[in-house]
Image (cartoon, grey):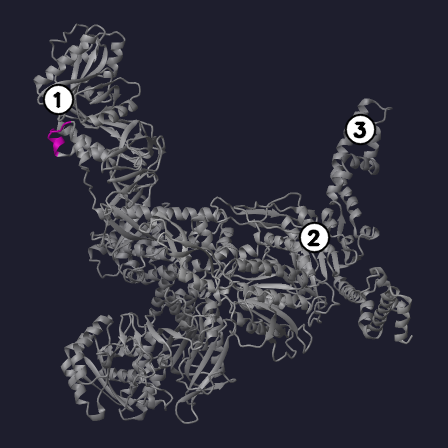
Amino acid sequence: MIKASEGGGGKGIRKVTCEEEVESSFRQVQGEVAGSPVFLMRMAEASRHMEIQLLADQYGNAISLKGRDCSVQRRHQKIIEEGPIIAATQSELRVMKDAAVRLAKMVGYSSVGTVEYLYADGKAHFLELNPRLQVEHPVSEWITNVNLPAAQLQVGMGIPLHNIPDIRRLYGEDPFGTSVIDFDTQDQIPPKGHVIAVRITAENPDEGFQPSSGMIQDLTFRNTTNVWGYFSVRSASGVHQFADSQIGHVFAFGDTREESRKAVVMALKELSIRGDIRTTIEYLVYLLERREFIENTIDTLWLDSLIRKKSLPAVQLEPKIAVICGAIHRAHTTWTNNRASFIRSVSRGQTPSSEMLAVEFPVRLIYEDVVYTLTVTKSSNRSYMLCMNGSFVCVKCTKLRDESLFLQIGSRSLVTYSKEEKTGLRLTIGTETYFFPEEEDPSKIRATAPGKIVRFLVRDATMIEEGTPFAEIEVMKMYMPLVSPVAGIIHFAVAEGTSVEVGDMLATMEFQDPSFAIKKAVPCLEGFNIDSIGPADVMKSMKPHQRLRHVVESLESVLSGFSFPKEIADVMMSDYFNDIVRIVNDPLVPYYEFVELMSVLRPSLPKAFSDAISSLLEKFRDQGISGMPFPFQELKSVFTTALKDCATQSIDTVILPLRELMTKYELSNEGHKQRILRRLLQIYVDTESMVPLSGAPREKIVAQLREENKDDLELVFRKCLSWENVASRSRLVTMILAEIEASSSVKYYKPVLESMSKLQSSGALSVSLKAKQLLMAQALPTFDERVSSLLDAFNTLLDVDDDDENKTESLDSVVRDPMITFNVLMAFFRHSNPRIQDLAAEAFVRKSHVGLNVRGFTSTRLGSILVSKWKFMNPTSAFGGQVDFQMPLMRWESALGLTLGSSGSTSSLPHITDPEIQYSVLLVVESSQHIVDHVEDLFQEIENDSSGDRSITMVRVVVLNEEPVTAITNCVATLKERLFEHDIRRITFAIPGKRVSDNLRHYTFRRRLDYAEDPIYRNVDPLFAYLLETRRLKNYDVKLIPSSNPQVHLYYAKGTSGDRGRGANSSYSRFFVRCLIQESDAFSAFNQQAYQLSEAERLFAETLNELEVAKGNPEMNKARYNHILVTVVPVVLFDLKLIRRVVHKIASTHMKRMVALGVAYVEAKLFVKTAPTAEPKTCRFTVSNETGHDMRIDTYVEKVGVDGGTAVFSSLFGEGPWNGISVNTPYEPLTMIQIKRMVAARTKSMYVYDFPILLAKALSDVWRKQRPSETRPDSLVICKEFVLEEGDMEDENRSIVLIDREPGRNTIGMVAWEMTIFSPEAPQGEGRKIIVIANDITFQSGSFSTEEDLLFQRVSQHAREKGLPRIYISSNSGARLGFAEEVKPVFRVMWKNPTDPGSGFDYLFVREEDYFELEKTKSIRAKRVVSDDGRVHYRITDIIGKKHGLGVENLRGSGMIAGETSRAYEETFTLSYVTGRTVGIGAYVVRLGQRTIQKADSPILLTGAQALNRVLGKNVYSSNIQIGGPQIMYDNGVSHIVVDDDFQGVLEIVRWLQFVPAHRGESPPVYQPVFDLPDRSVEYIPSATSVQDPRFMITGNYDAQGIWRGGIFDRDSFQETLAGWARNVICGRARLGGVPVGVISVETRRIDSVVPADPADPDSFEKTMVQAGGVWYPDSAYKTAQAIRDFNKGESLPLFIFANWRGFSGGMRDMHDEILKFGSYIVDSLREYQQPIFVYIPPEGGMRDMHDEILKFGSYIVDSLREYQQPIFVYIPPEGELRGGAWVVLDPTINVDMMEMYADERARGGVLEPQGMIEIKFRDPDLRATMRRLDMVASELFKQSVDLTISPVEREKASKLLQEREAILLPIYRNVAATFADLHDTPGRMLAKKTIRRVLNWRKSRKFFFDRLLRRLFEERILKEMDDEKMTRAEKLDLLYQWAPMDILDDSNDEIIWKWFNRHQEDVIAPKMDELRGKKKRELALEIMRTMSAEQQKEIIKELGL
């Protein structure tokens, strides 16, 4: 042993077994006890460690105080101590004690000390002397009753041992005596009992007792009479990594060793330490309960041997219970963190990810080398459900104050605490610890405890064996070796001296053995297999009222957004809901509720009252409560009587809970059920009503909720959570509504149903429609009323002979009655009268064979089975050839995997034909087993009735009891042989649903399928299967998709277009959906139209629901062009036009959802009678909407064709596309155009060739609204397409040509047109031309390559040259990228080591033969290389590619179109519409075009969300919309207008064009307003006292009486743009008397400017900055300048500015980072640069953020106004003011030719507001002087105060009175001063100083500005036509007015002047202009001649004949 003399506690001691270990062990000892002497000792193995406690005084006396056994040690550190010593013989013990005393005396020791021995082979060997008091001294104290610390002090004080009381008592002497004691000869009294002490250390037994550090949340320990302990830590403290690991010591006393052991075990089990640290508590219990310790056969090596063997305590819980607890902790931690993150994100203004609302958590745990994969679902606020391998567990979970969880798992109640560590999850359950590690990789060695790497024991990259120490780590003052878990080459990952934490990488291992296999945990393949923890088990122990409470709370949780496991969610909801219906009728429910409440209230109730209630409850119990109704009325009577007797006592408050319970059951159990269901429905309504913006982006909804609930963000979380599980909520509510319908109790739920019927959210649509149906159905007969009515009819028929025609007619009336459904008829199959049963059977058959001429109906009985037979006509014959019953066998794949028929085409398959007359039989049975029991008799009956052609080939079975399909299948399997024998072609079973309102379920088994079920026709009556029209699907491969609604049949179809080969994949998929309504209350009498509409709409909504579910399958979600066929079997009495209106209404209501689901076609097939006596017609109503915005409805009636054969469609109400074609015509494959529409729709974009269609529709809409009475042109859009000239792709000089070609024939991803459109403002008959450029998103994702760029540039250039408006339709993926595909398959790699690719490679090359092939196309550049073996290859240096447009050349083209767009904005009108995602160069082109319309779901991006997330290393952005959606681009000023869909987008384009000149330089289009004449007064008057929307001055508004008060511009003409950005400035376009103008106004109200939080920065906050009204801020100043530029460039609009600014904001703040905007500035600046530009791409670089500066944007306004080329009218409106810098940037001197300024009579203008002026120019001294001048009292007092002729006292008095007077007058005179200052700012002074042109009256301003505007427009047009550079503008104006008569030269009368201009354009102005042009030509000729010689001049004069 190498040991430091100053060591201890396991430190500074090492065992050495060989010479090689000496050096390292010696250094470890030196390191642990620095500076201590070190000595060597012989190692004694298998010994016991014993010690003798000494006490010696200063007088040479020394005694021993018994001994202690400390043999339980770990690494030579004591773990358990006990005393007295019982393992040594008494004789040897005496030797040890004597030797110890002798040693102390020899060295003259004085104090407390310990002599330690090693006891082996019955002998004691001296070890060491410890001259101190040791921590285990209480062991000796308890057995000797000697207080050792006190004795030590007394010895130190010089008191001899015989005078210490405790010592005297130990030797049996008087404690307070003074006699001398002979310690050498006198014996001590025997030791008292036995004491065991255990040391509590912060160490991890699972990791070799490595020290553990961290926080302690809770420490709980209680001292008792026989247990005592102390700790160095407490709750809410911690153990740091430099502390000693021992944190406590526990001592237990007992009369015997065994009692002491039991006491310490009990104390340890009750000791609780929870926190980050690990402790040895459990391990100590394990040691104390081991047999070796109990029998005391231990030694010093015992514990270390256990540790080496990894012998750990066995856990008490089943492993799966521990796994359940671990999974709950993982899930609960995730849930808690998600909730906190959600609330934190919302509080910062961020939009949290929907992942934060997850209620389902996958959990993977490893325990004891088994992998458990679970799914944990949060089923309520306090419970979870776990799923593993198909088994389920319910767990209640409550969070305790100390962060632990209280879990209830079945009957188990557990307190658990968890800690996530880097290496796994540590879980404490009670006092036991469980560890769930992450799956370990032995090649990575990680730190298992925090510490410092002291030194490495081996060199890096050294081969070491398994178990070899490779480093030393210092952990809590201890040096510990780190050993290798495997053999291999070690590579260190840290340096010596590095501090490490748990989980840090220390080293990696390179395995020596390549076949080394990492041990993998084995997956658990079992379920939980634990009793009493499943969902059903939870309620077994509950009483009925507790079960009811449990299920109600569970369903309320579902409605609140929680969920059951998805595998059993529907089953559990159904079971729980059925439990409510069942349990609520149990009389035990109210009984137990009253008993439970009385147990609580009894002590507070008067005894008489309590006894009376309790007596009745006990009586109910004693009488046998099962099945007996609860005596509510008796209880109420007793309650009332007892209450009267106690009236004198104040018990109202006490009995309030009883009153509430009485009220709850006042309407019996049924009333209680209704109350529960109403509450559940109300929760649903409240949740759905909370959706403030149905259909809005999630970000907007969350933002609005945050705004509404700023003080309760937890409510925002709950609301958002409740919406996430919308599908489960709706299914549950549907169950409730079905129960209400079945119980005919709608009237009790009417208020909540009415609220539900008004819900508008998409998730609640089907529920809302069902609620409407229930409300309407309330007026219809109930099920019982229908049964009663039918019974009366049957009783009437009992007396009618079977042959009587009246009987048949009466039965037919029953069949026709829509109130008599199959369910109603089935109710009579159990009637006691057999004849009634027969009538019901015949009615049932006739109803199912409507129109098939049922004859020969007979009924008989075989036991309890009703057997009916009949014959009927084949449907083909019955419908006169209109119905083709021939059903081709097709390839159908059911959900069960059945493959029926051929897998190829269906066209060549044989057809099945039926004879004209069919024979059938009906069997009515209680269950399918009855058929099996009577099989012989039944088939004998069938055989008796079969002869020749009369063979019965179809069997119908009605089963009266609900049965699963498996029972039916088993029944058919039993009958199979007999069915074949009798040639039964099909047997069909009809099974009732759970409720009488449920539809019958049909299962058909066919002979040709070997009597297997035909899955195609499940839930379809076989007689009407032809109505599915599956024959029309022959062009498709079809797969049946299971549907939850038996009326809806879904077929997933795959097809291939016959129109191939033009850039789009020709394969596609679509759904064909059939909804078959065989009977329904919907289509009843003519006067029930509202109900029929509701029912039809509900069924259609359910069809859409089924389609939506099917499209949720990722394999099918791309299906588009989906088709729905709704067939109504019963004949309906309706007007066809009314049906058409119904179809239009339903389609319009659901159109948005239909488009979202890709439904392009809907057919409704009905058999209609237009009059009661009319023959029914087969009618079909078709709804088509291929573009998503162009709905068309056609109506057809099926008629026999001209040839008398197959029926054809015949159009009604106009000719439809199906007119004249066969009704059996298969659905055609989709065309390539349709497929491309599908591709575009998947990207949420418009197909490029649909733009002209939508444009025509938008123009039609504008005509209808603006010019409803005028005749519009037949064709509103005429298109010619631009294409590039053919030639080399690299030729950038190719031009464009206009051609006519079919849509979809484009060969590049860009399409361009020259369009002539005919809009209301265009010249009649001429139209106007526009240029449209558009991306084709279906061609290589709309990317930009060189061809696309060149076409774009040429067409845009054409628009500039012609001065035509240029529209860009944007939907793209940025610049195209690609590879040289010809190089990819032939390049090779030159590896450094061909056998080891991991060593890397040198270069890429091609073989010689490949090089020569690639050289032909110049695809690569390469260097010739000759290898060592002489073979030649070519090293690739550059890959060029034979195809142009792979990379950088596309970027060059992008730069070209960027510059072109910048020019286009300057030279013509540009407008962009973003119809789909717009990326990279597409985004820049949009921004450079400035004016932008953005569709709400179409982002404008530079980089997509996925790419940014990869850069950031985490999922920050949930979608591209979050980055570039309208909430960014619209709020940032990039997008001017936002629309919801493409039609609205195109409509906005048309509306914008109405303000734009047809050609550059022309005046904007003017047309006379139809409704709003220019000379009306302005009726809207701005208020001087209240803040109103300033837009009302522009648009007008309704007053308080609802009367329209017009603003200054034409009504409904104002179109605002940029409304989302810089909202304290308003800009847009309007008309004044039909003249288009630009409008800029100020927002006078306060505005909150919001800068959103950045999701990429978790610490960012949403910032809200308050902006005052009437002030320019940086953003609004820039917006003003931007709007002025837009009005000026390309639009040429006169401009009106409503100037009401008080100035600019005095500070500077950051705006949003607007990279697109600033990027476009760079393009603009580079394009205009006039000096050489050199571009160098450096290795790296960046750009810092810029601050937005108010001066800069103010100057932009000046620049924009200075360049403006149209009239500008600046008008200070009523109550408006223009001051300071705001006046400066709007002063007319900026552009004197174009700008005019006006002020209203109530306006003001000046440098500062009056209050500001008086603070500078009229301060208090001036005010006082004015008072003394104007106020007689003040004047007199002032005179007295300065009058030297009076006494000082009088002067002082006068001064004081003067001050008092001035104080009173000062506020008044401040108002006087303000008025004085205000009079300097009046319009009169402005006019006098010539700063404004005129003062206006607001009411008359519209007329004035209209006249002034027209005059200015006439003037400007004429002045531009003069075009004489030598004349100044003033000279031109003088000349112009010289042409006019003198009487109109009054400059104030604009109306006379513009009207004169208008009247005399042809007779005066035009001749004058010709004269002026002639004069200019003559002057030009003279100037030229002056430059000639005299001879040349004569020659010219001669030639001119002059």
| Amino acid bearing label 2 | Ile
Please name the residue shown 36% across and 73% down the image.
Answer: 1051
Left or right: where 460 falls relative to 1170: left
Q: Is residue 234 on the magenta stretch? A: no
Secondary structure of the residue carrying numbered label 1 = strand
Camera-side residue of 680 and 1332: 1332
Frontmost of labels 1 and 3 is 1
Q: For numbered disc 2, what is the local secondary structure?
A: helix
Q: Which residue is mark 1?
A: 119
- Whichever of labels 1 and 2 marks the residue nearer the N terminus, that label is 1
- Residue 729 quadrant: bottom left
Residue located at (20% from left, 13% from top): 55
Looking at the rendered structure, the kind of residue marked 3 is Ala
Residue 1053, percent across and down? 37, 73
Of residues 1196 and 823, which is closer to you in this image? 1196
In percent of width and height, residue 30 lies at 28, 22
Specify the label residue 1088 is tagged with. Answer: none
The residue segment tinted magenta is 291-299
Is residue 1708 in view from this perspective? yes
For marks 2 and 3, give the CA distance.
58 Å
Disc 1 and disc 2: Cα gap in Å?
A: 101 Å
Q: Earlier in the sequence, mark 2 or mark 3?
A: 2
Comes first in the chain, label 1 or label 3:
1
Residue bearing the label numbered 3:
1854
79 horizontally vs 351: left or right: left
Give the residue pinned by disc 2: 1757
Q: Residues within 10 Å of mark 2 (few under 14, many from 20)?
A: many
Of 280 and 1870, the residue lying toward us: 280
Q: Amino acid at mark 1?
A: Tyr
Q: Residue at x 17, y 86 (%)?
A: 941
Tell me if residue 293 is in the magenta stretch. yes
Image position of 1811 (left or right of 1372): right
